Amino acid sequence: MSASWKLTLPCTRAEAEAIAGNDESPDGVVLMTSEIDEAAGRWRLDAYFDGKPAAATLKAVRALVPSAAGLRARAGPIPDADWVTMSQSGLEPVRAGRFFVHTAAHADAVPAGARAYRIEASRAFGTGHHETTTGCLMMLDAIKRRGARIDNLIDLGTGTGLLAFAALHLWPRAYATATDIDPVSIEVTAENAAINAVPTGQRQGRVALDVADGTASALVQRRAPYDLVIANILADPLIALAPDIAAIAAPGAQVVLAGLLNRRAEDVARAYRRQGFRLAERLGLGDWSILRLRRRG
């Protein structure tokens, strides 16, 4: 029997937006909402479980969609599948500043003058199609256009490696570090680096890869301080990381934060002001905010 289970429930748009706006899901559950009939306002919740879900877990998921309270839908096993790949299948290319992010299906559509990255739907987050990743690419491009000099950069929670690759393209003589708490993400990043001819390693002009929980890594600490820190994660982890990021940021460093909903932007900015940062810029894309902060001094 498959190790993966799935429950599908109808939901309202309001319920779908509330689910998208919640930073946390029940343990071991991946939640995906989609609009299935725009005219009728019909939406759907697909809940994927890592194994057969317990009754309490099913109850917690059902509580997210009160409109389906009377429905007798049941969770059932599904064939082994990569949930991220399924959710990102059929992706169209994305243009963000000078960057063009595409899958193999659109390799022949690269516009002239763009720096293209082939990032397939994979086991890690960060294909460039989510507003947070797109916004980070736009923010990095804007930082470069303003003439910023970056000699040492780090991408915390790198996912697919895309943001680290883009930053190294903008500042090709920098030392670059890309970390993630998930070893699979570092594997995916190494694969994507090879596909996109991005050099890896610890020398200048290369991306050093490391599995790390936040900044808790000998490599991260040894290479500090950084004059550019990128962290596209979630609001609560970003708030928790504020003291740690401050500890590895050089005076005057630029910090790009993403993965936070608009309603959480001020919470995140406040946590970093307490650590000696000032909010320099805020970019809004849909329901999401991308913040650029500067370290005082």
Image (tube, rainbow, N blue to C red):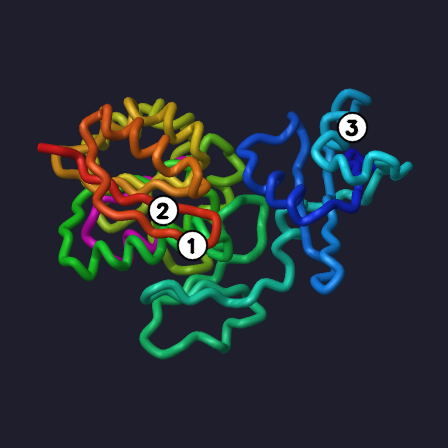
Q: Could you tell which of marks 1 and 2 lies nearer the N-terminus?
A: 1
Q: Choose the circle earlier in sequence order: 3 or 1.
A: 3
Specify the quadrant of the image occupied by residue 18: top right
Q: CA distance from mark 1 to mark 2?
A: 8 Å
> Which residue is the site of mark 2?
290
**Badge 2 density bin: few <14, some 14–19, many ≥20, Cα 10 Å:** many
Say what secondary structure mark 1 lies in.
strand
- The percent position of residue 120, horizontal first and vertical second, equals 55, 57
- Residue 201 appearing in the image: no
**Do callouts 1 and 2 mark residues in contact (Cβ within 8 Å)?**
yes
Write down the region rendered in magenta: 165-179
Residue at image coords 23%, 44%: 175
Disc with the residue nearer the chain's start (2 vs 3) = 3
> At label 3, which amino acid type do we have?
Leu
If the image is split into quadrants, where does the C terminus sit? top left
- Residue 285: give its label: 1
Residue 126 appears in the picture as rendered: yes
Between residue 213 and residue 132, name the one nearer to us.
132
Residue 166 among magenta residues:
yes
Residue at mark 3? 58
Identify the residue at image location x=50%, y=65%: 102
Q: Position of residue 34 (x, y in %)?
A: 68, 52
